[in-house]
Structures are given as C-alpha cells and as structure tokens.
Amino acid sequence: MRVLIIGTGLIGTSIGLALRNRAFDGEVWLVDSDLASAQLAADMGAGSLLAADAGPADLAVLAVPPEAVAVMLADAQARGLARFYTDVASVKQLPVAQARAHGCDMTTYIPGHPLAGREKHGPAAARADLFLGRTWAFCTSPETSRSGSACVVALIEACGAVPVNTDPVTHDRWVALVSHAPHLVAAAMAARLEPSGALDLAGQGLRDVTRIAAGDTGLWTQILTANAAPVAAVLADVAADLAAAAAALADGEPKAVIDLLNRGRAGVARIPGKHGGVQRSFAAIQVVIRDQPGELARLFNAAGAAGVNIEDIRIEHSPGLPVGVAELSVPPADVTALLDALQAGGWPVKPYLRRTGCGARGAPPGVRGPGGSHRKNLVASSSDPAAQAGLA
Ligand SMILES: NC(=O)c1ccc[n+]([C@@H]2O[C@H](COP(=O)([O-])OP(=O)(O)OC[C@H]3O[C@@H](n4cnc5c(N)ncnc54)[C@H](O)[C@@H]3O)[C@@H](O)[C@H]2O)c1
C-alpha cells in the first residue's frame, strides 16, 4: 500500500514512524505546508518527501487541524492524489459537514480519529509506538466505498491500533466525555497555579492531573468549539459535582465528598487498558540519576542492552538538587534483568519497586493501597526483587 501523509506534525509523523517501524510492506510519502516539518519527519525515518512525479497513493491521510481537513480533502481529490482519503481530526461532525459543503466525493472519504496523542505537537514529538494497542475510530456510511474502508482498516492495523467503526455523532458525544471535557478540567486546575511558594511542594499527583493542559491552545480551541454542546453538557455535570463537594466541605458535612471520591474510584477502575481489555500492570523501578548530559541516554542504553523494553518513563526533579528520580515502567518479568543491568552500570542507589498501570484494578492491597498511595515503595535488595515487591 502506498500511503501519502498530508501534515507531518505529531500525528502524521507518528503514523509514518509506526508504519516504517512495523515492517510495513509499502511506501510512505510525506508532505506539509511547512517544508521544514516534512523534511524533519523524513529525516526521522517517517517516509520520503512526496516526489513531483509520484503516482496516486492508495490512501492519503490528512493529519492537519480539524478546520483544514475539508479544504485539504477537496484540493487532494481535485488533484487525484490518492484513491481513498482519511483524516485524523479529533472531531468528526465538523470535517464531514464541511467536506459535504465543499462538494467532496464522500464515497472515497473515510473519516478517522486515533485515540492516542500527546500534549506536544510537531514532528519532533512523534513516536513510533503512539498507536500501539490504542483504539482508532473510523466512520462509514452507506455511501462509503468498501475497498476504501478496508484500506483504512489496513492502515490502522499496520500502525498497531484497534479499529472501531462508529458514526460522527456518536464519536463526538463519546470523545466529549473521554477526551475533550477532561482537557478543560485539567486546564481549570492548572489555571489555579499562579506563581507562589506552593509550587515548590508540587508532586506527581499535580503533574498527573494537569499534564494534558499543556496541549496547543489553537488546536484545542478548534476541537472544543467544534464539539461545543456535548463538551458543555459534561462540564456542567462536573461543575455540579465540584459545587456539591465545595458546599459539603464548607458545611463540615463530608457525605457528598465521600460519595464523589467513591464514584471517582469506581470510574477509574472502569477505564479499559490497551486493546479495550484489563489494564496491564508494570513494575516501576525508580532510579536516582544525576542531572547531567547523557545520563538518561546511559540509562536507556543499559535497558536496551539488557533486552528490556521500557514501557513508560517519568522523571521527578527536586528543585535545587543535582539529582532527579527516573521512574521506569517495565513488564514485571523484566525486573530482575533490568536491576542487574542497572547495578552493573553503577547507578548510585538501589532501585525501588512499585506496581504501576493506571488502573487500581488488580493491584494488590499494600502496593497501591486505599487512598491511591503511589509512594509505598519496597526496597529491592534480594536476589528476587520481583518477588520482594509482590510482583512475581
Ligand atoms: N495532538 C493530539 O494528541 C491528537 C490526537 C489525536 C488526533 N489529533 C488530530 O490530529 C490532527 C493534527 O494534530 P497534531 O497534534 O499532529 O498537530 P501538529 O500541529 O503537530 O501538526 C499539524 C501539521 O499540519 C500542518 N498543517 C496545518 N495546516 C496545514 C495545511 N493547511 N496544509 C498542510 N499542512 C498543514 C502543520 O504544518 C503541522 O505540521 C488534528 O486534526 C488533531 O485534532 C491530535
């Protein structure tokens, strides 16, 4: 399959990297209104720049902001750039309505949306594994070409994602709850963080709650305004819950607060893991690292040499200290190999272990206990650290 990616930012470049990284049997061509972005994506290995004499691609992926999709689609169809077209915009009713208004051929346009992303943008933030195990919505209607939808499903699966067929209205209502309203809730909390000494006490909980608020304002304004009514409905419910909790605290009557906390715990447990299944648990190894160039690369090299796949990493810095703590999430079966490699590499402290994976589901009491304590660490000092941490 020949895939043309139009828009080589975070998502477009990640698609190219995912295809190339997974031994995709085909070609990936890149184009962007910003030549530097397309060149950077090509240099990162996401594909090759679209040649002037390239024939039509099998599938063109419009990885541009939502409001640019329909104009791009009309232009690409007029130029015959591909047999079929899809997009990745985070809302679906807007590009579909605009595409109809522009007179686009709707039989060859199969709208899509990967439910994966980051709070950063541009090709430099792209990741080959961004879509692994994630759902990727696509919309078909009676007029959709069957070969076109098969082509989009093939792309989604080639990126390691799981295709979910839906319609634009349902899609927009659902993402209001699971993506768009959460973004504004995170922004509302982050907006309270005026400069003050309080920020010196900021820990991982605050970072977890506010991380997505760092997303691009322009892109998010397009997304939120295009899905205004469903997002507003979710926000009104959240605001009512918060108002009830605030009133209960002010009155010294905690029942509404306890109720909200319990409903919150139940909601977290309902969030599925990758592939829509039960969340995977990882062992988290915390390593003290010096705040100096090359230290993280050394850490990754040690893990790579030990054949250990780091599933996630986060880094905590203590202001003013010359060290930080890198927390590496790895499959529990890899803990011993990684600890051996780290100790052989001379890291200054023994690593600590805890169980991770966003869900409370399946986490044994005492590792992530009631109240969500993330800090109940167990020193890994025996010859079987996984067993020590209750992970074996
Ligand atoms: N960021 C996320 O987490 C995320 C997740 C899922 C879907 N999406 C969707 O993916 C799309 C792209 O988002 P992104 O995060 O990759 O943004 P980005 O800013 O990283 O990339 C957008 C790219 O599109 C290019 N572009 C913009 N207008 C263009 C035009 N008219 N012609 C050609 N190129 C143009 C820009 O130069 C840029 O390289 C959006 O529709 C967004 O809703 C984003």
Image (cartoon, helix red, strand yellow):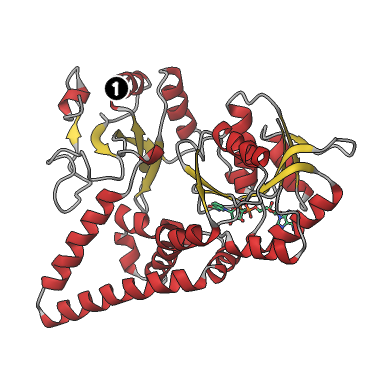
Residue at x 11% of width, y 71% of height? 255
**Quick one: 117 or 298, which is closer to the camera?**
117
Based on the displayed image, in which of its 4 quarters is residue 58 positioned? top right
Q: Secondary structure at mark 1?
A: helix
Please state which amino acid type lies under the numbered disc 1: Ala
Residue 1 point in image, percent of width and height: 70, 30
Residue 360's spot in the image, x, y percent?
A: 23, 45
Residue 210 drawn at (x, y percent): 39, 60
The crowding category of the residue bearing disc 1, from other C-alpha atoms within 10 Å (few below 14, some 14 to 19, many at least 20), is: some
Residue at the outermost right position: 53
Question: What residue sits 40% from the left and 62% below the top?
Answer: 177
Of residues 77 and 121, the one drawn nearer to the viewer in this rendering: 77
The percent position of residue 161, horizontal first and vertical second, equals 50, 37
Q: Is residue 181 left or right of residue 293?
A: left
Tell me, yes or no, if residue 382 can be seen here: yes
Tell me if I can see residue 322 in this picture: no
Residue position for label 1: 333
Q: Is residue 58 left or right of residue 360?
A: right
Depth check: 102 or 228 in front?
Answer: 102
Question: With respect to residue 196, does 33 lie above or below?
Answer: above
Residue depicted at x 46% and y 34%: 296
View quadrant of ligand 1: bottom right
When asked about the image quadrant of residue 275, the answer is: top left
In the displayed image of the protein, which residue is found farthest to the front?
Answer: 142
- In the figure, is residue 390 to the left or right of 131? left
Please count the marks in the image. Answer: 1
The quarter in which the C terminus is drawn is top left
